[in-house]
Amino acid sequence: MRSTRERSLVALAVVFLAVAAFNGVFALFDHVAWRGVIAAGCAVASAGLLFAALTERRR
């Protein structure tokens, strides 16, 4: 059974992934460097949160 902390981490990871996708799509069309950097940062943050949720599950 998933804990509240694990669910929160997964929900936050989904939000960061959505922001990454949103900025990634706009980075393709706007050709603005900061959008690509933000998209990459959000994707890394999302991966880190998912990793934290997986390690929380193993405890």
Image: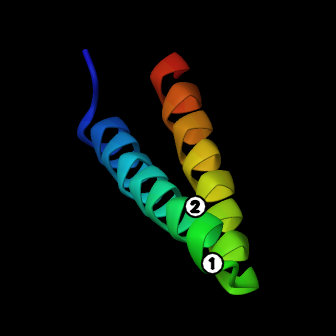
Q: Position of residue 43 (x, y in %)?
A: 62, 53
The correct choice, above or below, for 29 with respect to 15 in the image is below
Left or right of residue 27, residue 17 in this image: left
Q: Residue at x 69, y 78 (%)?
A: 31
**Could you tell which of marks 2 and 1 lies nearer the N-terminus?**
2
Left or right of residue 13, residue 46 in this image: right
Badge 2 is on which residue? 24
Q: Position of residue 46 (x, y in %)?
A: 55, 50
- Quadrant hosting residue 39: bottom right
Q: Quadrant of the N terminus?
A: top left
- Quadrant hosting residue 37: bottom right
Q: Residue at x 36, y 56 (%)?
A: 15
As measured in the structure, the alpha-carbon distance from the residue carrying label 2 to the one carrying label 1 is: 7 Å
The correct choice, above or below, for 26 with respect to 17 in the image is below
Mark 2 touches mark 1? (CB < 8 Å): yes
Q: Nearer the viewer, residue 12 or 37?
A: 37
Q: Position of residue 35 (x, y in %)?
A: 63, 78
Q: Residue at x 28, y 23 (%)?
A: 2
> Label 1 is placed on what type of residue?
Arg
Dot label at residue 35: 1
Disc 1 packing (10 Å; few <14; some 14–19; many ≥20):
some
